[in-house]
Image (cartoon, rainbow, N blue to C red):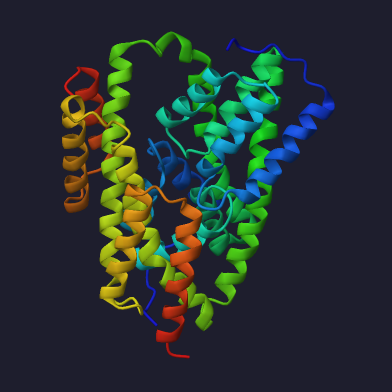
Amino acid sequence: MTTPMLLMSFSDWLSLFTHFLLLSLMAVGGAVTTAPEMYRYLVNQQHWLSDTQFSSSIAIAQAAPGPNILFVAVLGWNLGVNTGGVAAALLGVFITMTGLLLPSTILSYLAASWGHKNRDLRAVRAFKQGMAPIVISLLCATGWILACAHNNPARDWPLWLLTATATVVIWRTKIHVLWMLAIGAILGGVGLV
Amino acid sequence: MTIRNHLHPKSLTDLFVTFTVLSLQGFGGVLAVAQHELVERKQWMTNEEFVEEWAVAQIMPGPNIVNLALMLGGRYFGFPGAMAALAGMISIPLVIVLLLTAVYGQFSNQPAVIGALRGMGAVAAGLIIASGLKLSSSQKSNPLGIPLCIILGGVSFVGVALLRWPLVFVLLGLGSLACIVAYRNLKP
């Protein structure tokens, strides 16, 4: 599929915005969980982005520092670029990011304020402490899934070894994580992992 | 009730800078770095409190780590604090990711760049698992009791990591079960 050339009307931008407002409220368990729906909307339904643009947007955001949610900004940027010009790209970033963040931000802020005011209620304490072992385990599961993205044992065993070593070193020592990331970058850059 | 005796952010600027610094270290996810910066380096919260806040951030819609920033900023300085933490988390990384997007075409085929990203990705995965392991030591006095914590954690891990169940099912299904047991075990 080639890169689309677009003419976005006001109502197109508005429909993009309202769609992302809805996605924001559906993003329970993290923004990445809405990526498949964004793909369906932006690539399959509206043809605003090519398949390649969509996947490279996610790859760039993964490679850059910062929260994963920034892939949404890159999607907006690429969509704007398809309509031509930096101004449109910035508008795209603004619309996708505000759309995705506004409802969830308001809701989370209000819920958290309420929860903090009522933090000694039995129900609030039960919720937080009951969820704790599950969210901890989900953290380990996320790391596991990331490590398993490379799944060819013959070729990827050095990567797995690096992940296992990094796990133990960071768990057991007080080394700064940036050192470990730098070591990973060097090992990968010279082709050892 | 445990005695809560730890440091706290000094100002809105302190919040903004702290969240910028931790966000800029987050390759492949910010949560693990957040635990390191907020609990171990800044000592704004204990591991127990971090897990409790994280549970709320995870169950609310929207990006978890953004929710965590909002909650923590709001706790100390109200709405302006929430906005300062959010701005710190997002603004400078946003500029960087857009600059990267603009030059992506020139570097996307360089083997050294691809290799470096692979290596960093592998370390980032280890970092996330390590923070999970660190946080698990905070559960010794959980009202669910250690055996049930291990069972719940084990089933969630197998479900999500190996069987690839949707996250929402685990959070709502196992989560509500865990909350009910915790409610019964906590003293009224």
Q: Please indicate, yes or no, whether residue B110 appears anywhere in the rendered image.
A: yes
Q: Give the residue furthest to the bottom.
A: B188
Quadrant of residue A62 within the rendered picture: top left
Q: Please indicate, yes or no, whether residue B11 appears anywhere in the rendered image.
A: no
Horizontal relation, residue B111 to residue B105: left or right? left
Q: Give the residue furthest to the front.
A: B163
Q: Position of residue B168 (x, y in %)?
A: 51, 55
Q: Quadrant of the C terminus of chain A?
A: top left
Horizontal relation, residue A150 to residue B182: left or right? left
The structure residue drawn at horizontal position 29% and vertical position 61%, both measured from the top left corner, is B154
Q: Nearer the viewer, residue B56 or B86?
A: B56
Q: Position of residue A136 (x, y in %)?
A: 35, 59
A156 vs B43: above or below: above
Q: Quadrant of the N terminus of chain A?
A: top right
The number of numbered discs placed on residues in the rendered structure image is 0
Q: Nearer the viewer, residue A69 or B87?
A: A69
B90 vs B10: above or below: above
The structure residue drawn at horizontal position 50% and vertical position 52%, both measured from the top left corner, is A29
Q: Position of residue A188 (x, y in %)?
A: 23, 23
The structure residue drawn at horizontal position 64% and vertical position 46%, both measured from the top left corner, is A24
A114 vs B42: above or below: below
A97 vs B182: above or below: above
Q: Position of residue B108 (x, y in %)?
A: 41, 14
Q: Nearer the viewer, residue A77 or A134?
A: A134
